Image (cartoon, helix red, strand yellow):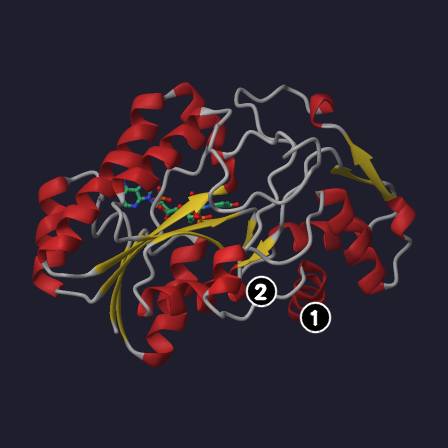
Amino acid sequence: MTVLVVGAAGQLGREVVRKAGATGDVVGLDRSALDVTNRDAVRSAVAVRRPSVIVNCSAWTDVDGCELDPARADLVNARAVGYLAEAAAEVDAHLVQVSTDFVFDGSPIGGELLPYPEDHPTAPLNVYGTSKMAGEVAAGPMATVVRTTWLQAADGPGMVGQILSALAGDGPVELLGDRRACPTFIEDLVPALLRLAGERVSGVVHAVNAGPASWADVGRAVAEVVGADPTRVVAVEEVALSPPRPARRPAWSALDCGVLRRLGHEPLRHHRDAVAATVARLTG
Ligand SMILES: NC(=O)c1ccc[n+]([C@@H]2O[C@H](COP(=O)([O-])OP(=O)(O)OC[C@H]3O[C@@H](n4cnc5c(N)ncnc54)[C@H](OP(=O)(O)O)[C@@H]3O)[C@@H](O)[C@H]2O)c1
């Protein structure tokens, strides 16, 4: 597999470059090397390198920024995906597009909060989600669209590191308790993503660590791992955030990984195991 990673300086892009490079040929292009909104530059970067796989890790991920600038959100998160799909088709490369739980609105399924399956109707609440949903369509029917949630960097402190720092103090540790999804650790996501790429799987695939949680739940899990008092973690509600944020977010956006199961892929481990491994990495 020869892999071209665009958006290679982001938290996901860095790990895709690292893991793909361990087993094959990889070229990572950050925004300064390739601006994906430049259609001609995309076509020529792909035509010169002729990869077998393109992994699009570029996106405008500032959810509140997108709310204030829908045109830019659409350009980066949707139209540019179309440019990548077009360029990929010209060299028969397989495109992997990364998408988000924010394509869903958080409503229950049949009155119950169940993880969303891949074919659940999308209904984004904000501009970011709308632009990413358009990006899924722009990727085309042959691409793998990998939806994931609440990414945690493989090479940085992330939320687990922030929680560790807060627990090192004495006071209460306030964390959001009224939104739940599946905290997903990039070190676990990337092998799944690269396997899907190698198999040239078409369509939407959910890939998240197991176990829905709020950040307050994750805070208590970190406290248990380090032997701190979990009752120091205080769940706060999003409405208490000051100032209020421009973009609405779904209160529930856990994803069911049914397609991965049907493909016979190993499920991503429970997020609590990933939390423990991250604590060990950060404190070891
Ligand atoms: N983070 C999450 O919790 C989360 C959850 C679900 C899904 N996702 C999806 O996962 C993917 C990766 O996200 P991430 O967390 O790795 O985001 P990230 O750290 O913000 O990385 C995104 C990268 O895209 C680059 N980029 C922005 N505009 C570009 C352009 N016009 N041309 C080329 N590159 C451009 C950014 O470069 P600059 O920094 O220079 O702008 C940045 O390096 C995205 O598709 C995102 O929607 C993320």
Residue 207 shows up from this direction: no
Identify which residue is drawn at 73% across, 33% down. Answer: 178
Amino acid under disc 2: Leu
Which residue is disc 2 drawn over? 268
Q: Residues within 10 Å of mark 2 (few under 14, many from 20)?
A: some
Give the image quarter of residue 107.
top right
Give the image quarter of residue 115.
top right
Residue 84 in the image, given as x and y percentages of width and height? 20, 48
Residue 74 in the image, given as x and y percentages of width and height? 31, 29
Amino acid under disc 1: Ala
Which residue is disc 1 drawn over? 280
Residue, far front: 110
- Foreground disc of the pair 1, 2: 2
Residue 14 in the image, given as x and y percentages of width and height? 40, 61
Identify which residue is drawn at 33% across, 56% down. Answer: 8
Q: Nearer the viewer, residue 246 or 201?
A: 201
